[in-house]
Image (cartoon, grey):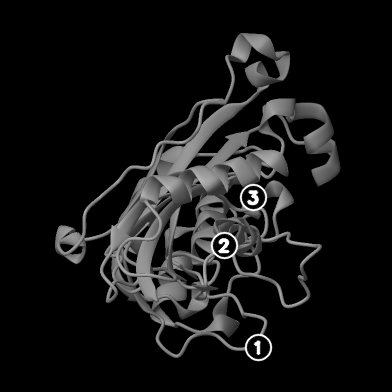
């Protein structure tokens, strides 16, 4: 029996998926997470065994990925290479297309047995898409009904004015670098935050954004001002990016100021979260890329594994 390790580069729309992590209640007839669906697709290869999938980033329900990564060990009878990387890619994509799952494998790469998708990653880049409405609405539901273009449903966070983007430059610079981000850490299901809450944010930028469709195709686009928040770092605490966006929105709306953000950093504690800041919803969050150092692939070849024609 031979076993090889594969690295999957996976994109997905998270609106109808229950995050990356396979749910305990999932069973053979119901796979609703990215991990559960990938495992079921891999079984179509009929391997002798499938070791547990290890994702680089455990995105939540509703969060999207342009490119997330995961490694998996596949074993089969005989020696040598049992599955070409392109076979893995094509088999999975045929399966996702058949079941109408909004998941695609961009490519599959052979990696050494010592490679780990999570721990070997040197950086992750996230994009958060938001748009400002032209006028306040009476409620959050009214915001969606009055201003949300249909193509943006589940992929955009609508915020109400005022929104002063010029106030965000100093906040972004303050959050960059190494800090104890315990104040930005959300309690996980097990009821605790990580013991180690020091993280480094390499960069945060807030720039004018773009709609997903030509704005002339939907009159609602003319009523929105789009902004992109890009956050780059090695790793992040649970919901840290969404809380960071929530703080930025709070500052732009003049609910928070620079001193409030400094207080979150100077007094790192989950109990120190500012009640004036709203945690941004998952809808606008996209994992853009996971970066690895070249040397971790040195022992194996690379096969892009083209997807079948659709």
Quadrant where the image shows the N terminus: bottom left
Element class at badge 3: helix
Element class at badge 2: loop
**Is there CB contact under 8 Å for labels 1 and 3?**
no
Is residue 298 shown left or right of residue 24?
left
Query: Which of pointers 1 and 3 lies earlier in the amino acid sequence?
Result: 3
Query: Which of pointers 2 and 3 lies earlier in the amino acid sequence?
Result: 3
Percent position (x, y) of residue 55? 47, 66
- Choose mark 1 or mark 3, whichever is in front: 3
Q: Which mark is residue 80?
A: none
Category of crowding for the residue at label 2, using alpha-carbon neighbours closer than 10 angstroms: few (below 14), some (14–19), many (at least 20) = few
**Is there CB contact under 8 Å for labels 2 and 1?**
no
Among all residues in the image, which is located at the extreme front? 78
Count of residue discs: 3
Q: Quadrant of residue 189?
A: bottom right
Percent position (x, y) of residue 130? 57, 40
Q: Which mark is residue 46?
A: 2
Disc 3 designates what residue? 14
Q: Which residue shows up at 27% across the image and 64% down it?
A: 122
- Choose mark 2 or mark 1, whichever is in front: 2
Disc 1 designates what residue? 191
Of 75 and 226, which appears nearest the observer? 75
Category of crowding for the residue at label 1, using alpha-carbon neighbours closer than 10 angstroms: few (below 14), some (14–19), many (at least 20) = few
Query: Which of pointers 2 and 1 lies earlier in the amino acid sequence?
Result: 2
Q: Quadrant of residue 159?
A: top right
Q: Which residue shows up at 60% across the image and 63% down it?
A: 39
Marks 2/3: CA distance? 27 Å
Element class at badge 1: loop
Q: Quadrant of residue 306?
A: top left
């Amino acid at each position: 029996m031979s076993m090889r390790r594969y690295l999957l580069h996976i994109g997905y729309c998270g609106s109808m998926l229950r995050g990356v992590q396979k749910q305990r209640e999932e069973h053979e007839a119901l796979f609703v997470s990215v991990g559960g669906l990938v495992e079921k697709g891999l079984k179509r290869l009929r391997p002798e065994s499938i070791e547990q999938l290890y994702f680089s980033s455990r995105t939540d329900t509703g969060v999207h990925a342009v490119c997330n990564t995961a490694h998996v060990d596949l074993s089969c009878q005989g020696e040598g290479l049992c599955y070409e990387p392109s076979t893995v890619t094509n088999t999975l994509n045929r399966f996702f297309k058949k079941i109408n799952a909004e998941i695609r494998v961009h490519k599959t790469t052979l990696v050494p047995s010592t490679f780990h998708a999570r721990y070997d990653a040197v950086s992750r880049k996230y994009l958060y898409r938001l748009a400002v409405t032209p006028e306040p609405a009476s409620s959050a539901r009214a915001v969606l009904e009055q201003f949300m273009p249909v193509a943006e449903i589940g992929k955009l966070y609508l915020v109400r004015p005022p929104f002063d983007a010029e106030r965000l430059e100093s906040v972004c610079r303050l959050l960059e670098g190494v800090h104890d981000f315990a104040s930005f850490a959300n309690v996980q299901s097990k009821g605790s935050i990580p013991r180690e809450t020091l993280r480094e944010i390499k960069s945060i930028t807030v720039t004018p954004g773009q709609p997903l469709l030509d704005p002339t195709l939907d009159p609602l686009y003319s009523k929105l001002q789009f902004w992109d928040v890009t956050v780059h770092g090695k790793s992040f605490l649970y919901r840290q990016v969404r809380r960071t966006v929530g703080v930025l929105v709070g500052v732009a709306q003049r609910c928070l100021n620079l001193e409030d953000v400094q207080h979150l950093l100077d007094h790192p504690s989950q109990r120190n979260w500012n009640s004036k800041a709203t945690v941004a919803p998952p809808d606008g969050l996209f994992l853009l890329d996971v970066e690895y150092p070249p040397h971790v692939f040195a022992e194996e070849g690379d096969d892009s594994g083209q997807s079948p024609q659709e």
